[in-house]
Image (cartoon, rainbow, N blue to C red):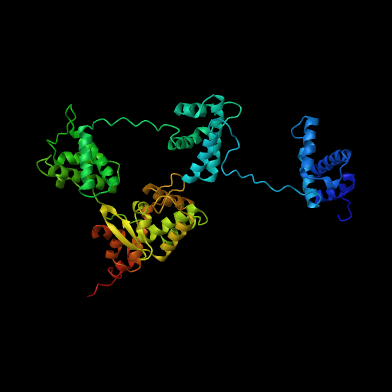
Amino acid sequence: MADVDVNRADLMQAWAEPLEAWLRASDISLERSRRAVLAFGRFSVWVTGRGLVAGDLDEDLIDEYVRAEQVRSGSRVPAAAQYLPLVKRFLAAQGVLVPRAAVSRRRDGRPRLQGGPLGQVVLDLVAWMKEQGYAAGTVGPVACTAARLSCWMARQRLGVQDLDDAVLARFAASQSRGPRRHPSSARRIVTVRKFFVATALLAPPPSPPPPAAPTPVEQLLHDFTGHLRTGLGVSPGWAREVGGWVEGFVAELAVHADGQVVWDGVDAAAVNRYVSRRGQGYSLSSRRHLVSSMRGLLDWAFVTGRVKRSVSAGILAPATPAAPALPRALSSVQVQALITAADAGTPAGLRDRAIVVLISRLGLRAGEVATLGLDDLNWHAGTLVVHGKGGRVLALPIPTDVGQALVDYLRGGRAAADRAVFIRLRPPLVALSRQGISNVVAHLAAVAGMGTVHAHALRHTAATAVLAAGGSLVEARELLGHARTDTTMVYARTDLVALRVLAPTWGKVPGP
């Protein structure tokens, strides 16, 4: 290309052959290359007619020619607009044309559509969503919805002072019809409304009416579950479950028209009939919960003077199989499959991996993992504090692999928000619930092709690993935080190495 005179008046004559060669080398199709050469020829005639040479070329000159072609042809996209960009690239590659500096198209969540009474409010919405931790891919679409709301309000001659739920509902309905529909606005306006309420642009929803006076049955259940929480220290979740088991029995006692609970005539036979009927279709574990809940209710009724004698001892326990099932622990290969299923290259993967390693090594319950806080981690002592069932507080060592998994997550996968260790990845950025922890394990199991796996299976895995490594039942009990040793005894049946010495070899009589 060195022998080409860039100052020659006839651009086509000087650059036609080099342009064709460049198009071929760039793998441009034959038809597109032909049209680009023709467009360049017409542009060359236009430039020559104005007395210009190649040295006068710049992008502004080409853009001026494109606008002239739009006027001449009456088309918004004439041939010049379609094919001269290729010529621009060619001339820039030859050093004839100095392209303009690239302009970033990133708008950082700000919508292009502006105007209306919410112009500044939309920008405040973008800043608020970033503070709340919304993903960049969510900020932009929601801000665009707010911008469309602003333009719609301008057409309706509404101001900021007119904002209310009725206006938002009318806007969402308008977005589902017409030539330019945006049905997603009905979903995204929910986030916009949260911002309006948070910044007092929209009045918060009216407070619900005060609850009606509780019925005698509701009051009795409230008193009983309150006793469980304050007197016995059970968790609110367990108190609700106990209340659910005994609610039907208490309702049957309210035989009077005024709904008063009458305890006269309560005996073991009546209770057993209720237990038998209520427990139909439930598992053995659930029926045991039913029996223990009913015994707790009757003991409380006796202590508080509602019944004259305790009949809880007369409640029949559900039939127990001769050989209860072994705890369903996972093998080391299955645990590793769960860990591998978590993508360590993403914040979600780092969090999920830390959850699996933590439960499988320390045997925590899902609820205990959910309540774990940053203040419970003592990195200097290498321990963590677990708040277990019944108000028990356990201090457990942090193994090396658990510590590394936690550090990786806290450094690369956790947003700085709630003081809980494991938090949601989507706003609101608060602690994962007990169900959220269980869902993490279930999701990884599905990804690994392992079917249904509950978080409690990892707890069983930690207990059996202690016994397999030569640990005692007392050590397993301390790790699991069991209140009674007999609860841990079920894991003794999984320790085949210890059990093998108790079984004599076939054909031999046990010796002293």
Residue 436 visible in image: yes
The front one of 401 and 93 is 93
Q: Position of residue 376 (x, y in %)?
A: 35, 58
The front one of 142 and 17 is 142
Left or right of 22? Residue 200 is left
The front one of 270 and 478 is 478
Q: Position of residue 262 (x, y in %)?
A: 14, 34
**Residue 212: quadrant of the picture:** top left
Left or right of 302? Residue 503 is right
Question: Please, which residue is most extreme toward the bottom here?
Answer: 512
Q: Position of residue 483 (x, y in %)?
A: 24, 57
Residue 448 visible in image: no
User: How many numbered callouts?
Assistant: 0
Which residue: 27% across, 72% down? 508
Question: Please, which residue is most extreme toward the left here?
Answer: 308
**Residue 305: quadrant of the picture:** top left
Image quadrant for the C terminus? bottom left
Q: Position of residue 45 (x, y in %)?
A: 87, 39
Image quadrant for the N terminus? bottom right
The front one of 164 and 486 is 164
Q: Is residue 323 above or below residue 435?
A: below
Q: Is residue 448 above or below residue 211?
A: below
Q: Is residue 224 above or below residue 500?
A: above
